[in-house]
Each structure stands twice: as C-alpha cells, then as structure tokens.
Amino acid sequence: MDSALNTGDTAWMLTAAAMVLLMIPGLAFFYGGMVRSKSVLNMLMMVMGALFIVGVLWVIFGYSMTFGTSMGGLIGDPTEFLGLESLMADDPESTLPIMAFVAFQGMFACLTVGLIAGAIPDRTKFNGWLVFGGIWAILVYFPVAHWVWASGGWIFEMGVIDFAGGTAVHINAGAAALALAIVIGKRAGWPKTPMRPHNLTLVMIGAGLLWFGWFGFNAGSALAANNTSAVVFLNTFAATCAAAIGWLVVEKLRDGHMTTLGAASGIVAGLVAITPACSAVSPIGALIVGVLAGVVCALAVSLKYRFGYDDSLDVVGVHLVGGLLGTLLIGFLATDLAPAGVNGLLYGGGAEQLGKQAVGAFSVMAYSFVVALIIGLILKAAGIMRISRDDELSGIDLVEHAESAYELGDSGGGGHFVGVGAGSVRRDREEI
Amino acid sequence: MKLVTAIIKPFKLEDVKNALEAIGVRGMTVSESSGFGRQGGHTEVYRGAEYTVDLVPKVRVEVLIDSQRLDEVLDVITKGANTGKIGDGKVWVTPVEEVIRVRTGERGIDAL
C-alpha cells in the first residue's frame, strides 16, 4: 500500500512538539528566577502543574473540543475524538500523522495555561491554581484555539492572521493573568517591600530555553518542513534580537543601565510579538515588530504601579501587550511576498486586514478576561484561591510543598529523620 | 585574653589575613555579613522599578588573642583593612574569660 507520509515533515513536527514542551520548564525557570527564594519551588510547580493537568484534559477531550467538527464556529465537537482512540490508525492519504499534530497542539494548550501563573506567584493555593487552570483550559483555551485555528472557527473563517498564537496564546493568557491578579490581590507588602528577583542567572537560562523552544513553536506551526517554516524561523530570530535591543535602549535612557532582566524580558517580548506575525512580514518587518515590542513592553511593565494591580512577573505587560502589538502590526506590516500572502496598510493593502486583526485580538481579550474573572471569583468565594497572610510572609514553598529550594549549609538545618509517611501521623495529632 | 572583631570590606580580607599571619596569629573565624554605617547602600533597578538596598556586604573577622598583643593586632588589622574611603568598617575589642581547645582540653593562653 502506498503511503503519502512525508518523513521529513513528520520528523520535524515531532521535534517541534518536543521543543515546545521544553519551553514549559524554560518558562518555569524564567519565572522562578524572578520570584524570591522562598517561593521559587511553588513557581516551578505552578507552571509544571499546568502542563500535567492540561495534558490530561487534552488527551481526553481537549483536542476534540479544539479541532473536532465545528459547532457554529464556537467549539469543536468534544465527543468526536474522545480519548484520541480513533486517531491511531495510519491514514495513507495524510502527509503528516495526525498524532504528531495532536501532540504539537497539546503542548500549546499546556504552555498557555502556564503563562498565567506569572501574575500570581507567592500567594496562590496550589490546588486552587490547578482547579483554575483546568477550568480555564476547558472554558477558554480550547474554545479560543478553535475560533482561531480550526477550520470553521469564526475568527479563522474571518481571515484573521494568527500564525502561531498571538491571540490564542498570548492575548488569551495575558487577559486571564490580569483578571486573576485583580481577583487574588497584591502580595503582602507590594509595592513598598522590595521583592527583588532571587536568581537572574536562572531567568536567563529560562529565556534561552524559551527562545530555543520558540523555533519549534513558530516554525513548527507551518506544520511541515518547508519554505514557510524556514522564513518563519528567520523572522523569529530577527525580531527577538531587535526586541532585546529595544528593551535595553529604553532602560539605558530611562534608568541609566542595561540590565540582565531587561535583556531576558526583551527576548520574550520579541518572541511574543512575532508569534502571530512571523508568516506575514518580511525580515525587515520582523525587525520592526521586534524593536517596537521591546520598547513598548519595557514601558508597559510600569503600568501596574500606576493602576495598582500586582501582575507580579508582568504577564500583562509582556504577553498581553506584546500579543496585541504583534497581532495588530500584521495589519500594517504584512507583505504579500511573505508566506501568508497578504498586504497590510503600509504595503498598499488598505485597512481591511487591520480591522480583522483588531476584531480577533479584542474579542479574545474580552472573552478571556471576563471568563477568568468569573472563575477566579467563584474559586475565591470557595476559599481555595489564596493562602493566609502569615503563610505568605513565611514563604509559600514551605507551606504548600513542605520543601525549601536551597540547602547550602552542611548542618542539615539541625533536624532529624522523623519517619516515612510521618506527615499524616503528625497532622492527625495536630487535629486532636 | 581578648576577642577582636573586625567588620571589613570583603576584598580586604586577604590583606588582613596575611598581616595577622605575618605577626604570628594562628587562627581566625571569618563570616559573610552585611550591614550599614555611614557608607549607606546602593540602588538596583528591575524592569524599571528602583529599589534601595541598605545592607552592604561585609566580612566579619574574629580573632582570639593574648591581651599583651592587643595593640599590635589592632594595628595590623586597621592598616590591612584601610582604603581611606567611606565604608572601611569597624574594629572592636571584647574581654574573654576563658578559652578551651576542644581536641585537647587545653585552657586559657595555651588554647590560643
């Protein structure tokens, strides 16, 4: 039997999916280095926890909700590919095994939920976060990804260009992050108490892993090893370099120093902004998207002090603002020489594409914000959203995970071995 | 016997240690510490948010000595730690009642 399978495409897509998975621990390190040493483990666990929960949901019905037959352009049929059993058979007509696509898209869902965690470190109950992440994936990510990427999805059919996730991933996560930061409230002592990043080397390791993985995220979104994937790869590289420069220049002019955290943040801002646009702009266009993302996001991260919401690690300033910027800039900078084949305002294409981009971007932002706000308020009312002030001040790692990140001395903390499973015995005793 | 405690700039530790060894002081305890005096702290900027950091990193050197050598020891520590700039640190002296070498049980001057 002849098979249409393209081994090059298949090999690339499996590799790209693994690269997107690597972004998740990368994100955990990027965020983890920015929090204080008493909450780094919780930060890592929030991001990794999102991966575990959303990964399971994706297999059971998440893929089907996203890419099943569209029901009115709003949601895929959740029962069509329930449990993915029907997708295991080899399809001789397909150039790419469907499971490679399922795996690749699943990583996106996990990463998107993980992004939100950066707004609410140090103070969120771990079980409350997992419940939120699961519900938000079901009510927001799966439907929105359907709108944007699935055949029949209303934003997709409208002709909005979002190559790899400016709306579905970054605006989506950024809007939810803003809602949760408002619902959960400020960290104790913010903004008066200094909350310096505890490990900037970890932040840069995370940024490096994110950048590497992002080539899988963007170039993999071509769903083939072809010319589009190569153009997208180069544009992703170009925009990111320009964004880091843009962020550092703002810092130099405003604060007098170019910082490591600024460089790492500029990298991520550039990656975010080029994500929707990487198939639609020229390499020079990518440089412009990048430098604007670096400059605008470097300024946007200060908004939280003006408006008084504690988006602790700037998910709003980087992902929401960067995502909006990249999605809207397509309307100006798109050129029909690029794989997407559309001209933006500056290339004589008129304002039509810009209008579509704006509708897509703001619809996703409004929907994600409102639903995240409602889920957050319900979980807050149920009392599973925020740890106590005392627990927060003493450090969430110890309270939520019974661990501490760094044991640098040789004295072992002056303790002794209590016994295996002794925790449950001790809890019983405390209850008496 | 006296306990001499010196808070010095971290990069002057080598000079102070060498000077004490040169006059025959056989041991010391060194710990990383932080604090502030007239020098004050510095500012750090993270994503545009400026913080003042009041506590400056210092090194704390502690030496147990025979009282008769006090002036000589204070002299080499002060010279070794001096840069002439603000933040050079402080040295103070505390009387010590008893010293015991754990391994042998020797006491007093013999334990130094």
Image (cartoon, coloured by chain):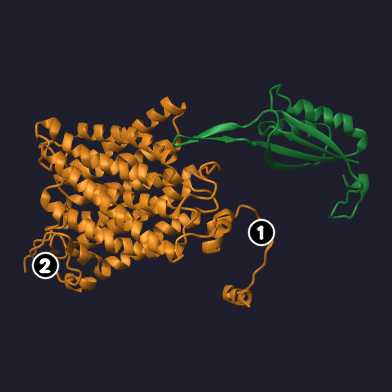
What residue sits 39% from the left and 60% below the top?
A377
- The correct choice, above or below, for A335 with respect to B108 in the image is above
Circle 2 residue: A91
Q: Quadrant of the N terminus of chain A?
A: bottom left
Going by the image, does A233 lie left or right of A118? left
Can residue A44 be seen here? The reply is yes
Going by the image, does A233 lie left or right of A409? left
What is the residue that sits farthest to the top in this orientation?
B84
How far, Cα to Cα, is label 1 from label 2? 59 Å
Quarter of image, res A52 = bottom left
The image shows residue A421 at horizontal and vertical percentages of 57, 75
Chain A pictured colour: orange
Front-most of residues B46 and A372 = A372
Q: Nearer the viewer, mark 1 or mark 2?
A: 1
**Are the two marked residues, 1 and 2, in contact with CB atoms closer than 8 angstroms?**
no
The image shows residue A69 at horizontal and vertical percentages of 13, 65
Secondary structure found at label 2: loop
What residue sits 47% from the left and 47% below the top?
A33
Upstream in sequence: badge 1 or badge 2: 2
Instruction: Say few, some or many: other residues with alpha carbon within 10 Å of mark 1 (under 14 / 14 to 19 / 20 or more).
Output: few
Going by the image, does B30 lie left or right of A369? right
What residue sits 23% from the left and 46% below the top?
A362
Secondary structure found at label 1: helix
Front-most of residues A82 and A168 = A168
Q: Amino acid at mark 1?
A: Gly
The image shows residue A160 at horizontal and vertical percentages of 15, 47
Are discs 1 and 2 both within one chain?
yes
Q: Chain of mark 2?
A: A
Q: Amino acid at mark 2?
A: Asp
Can residue A403 be seen here? The reply is no
Circle 1 residue: A413
Chain letter tied to green: B
